[in-house]
Image (cartoon, rainbow, N blue to C red):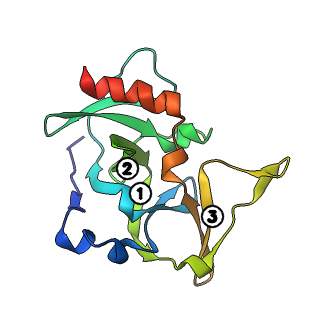
Amino acid sequence: MAEMRRDIDFDDDLYDDEDTQKDKYLTFFMAGEDYGIDIAYVTEIIGIQKITEVPDMPVFIKGVINLRGKVIPIMDVRLRFNMKERAYDERTCIIVVDINGTAVGLVVDEVREVADIPEAQVEPPPQTGKGRSSRYLKGMGKVDDEVKILLNAENLLYDEELEKLETIGEG
């Protein structure tokens, strides 16, 4: 399969100002639903590429890639959410995010767009039982007649998982 790259660099001056990032979410499609992640965490978007498996990692960590000389751990978001695994295709993308100083690649089915979702249009996530909502969800964003599931980037990994991934990049 020919490598496809859709690099979008989010380090432009436009994104340096915190106000320009407020209420902006990178939206993506996965398992029939639209999701969003706060644009402030996104550093770039790349096409799927060869992933090197790393032993003794959680099942949702597919391995690592070499991105311009930097080793980046790759998480399959479908597997993180206990969804059915899907073969990667030409629409599959890796969203590189920075979570507390650690770069992590998130594999998603398809990247959509950057959407403005004002705080007033974000409702709390549904409760999953015992009065708790999923730790991964920030809220439900209402855009026209659609709902986008907004992810809490900082909670995609537990502290101990993040620490384990930090050691990959150092080695």
Amino acid type assigned to the residue bearing label 3 in the image: Gly
Question: Residue 63 bears which disc, if any?
Answer: none
**From this viewpoint, which residue is outermost toward the right?**
130
Kindly indicate the quadrant of the structure image that contains residue 66: top left
Q: Is mark 1 on a helix, strand or loop?
A: strand
Q: Where is residue 80 in the image (x, y as percent from the top left)?
A: 55, 38
Kindly indicate the quadrant of the structure image that contains residue 88: top left
Amino acid type assigned to the residue bearing label 2 in the image: Thr
The residue under the point 42% across, 74% down is 22
Asked whether 3 or 170 is in front, the reply is: 170
- As measured in the structure, the alpha-carbon distance from the residue carrying label 2 to the one carrying label 3 is 24 Å
Quadrant where the N terminus is found in the figure: top left
Which residue is labeled 1 in the image?
110
Which residue is labeled 3 in the image?
139
Q: Is mark 2 on a helix, strand or loop?
A: loop
- As measured in the structure, the alpha-carbon distance from the residue carrying label 1 to the one carrying label 3 is 20 Å
Q: Is mark 3 on a helix, strand or loop?
A: strand
Amino acid type assigned to the residue bearing label 1 in the image: Glu
Quadrant where the C terminus is found in the figure: top left
Which residue is labeled 2 in the image?
92
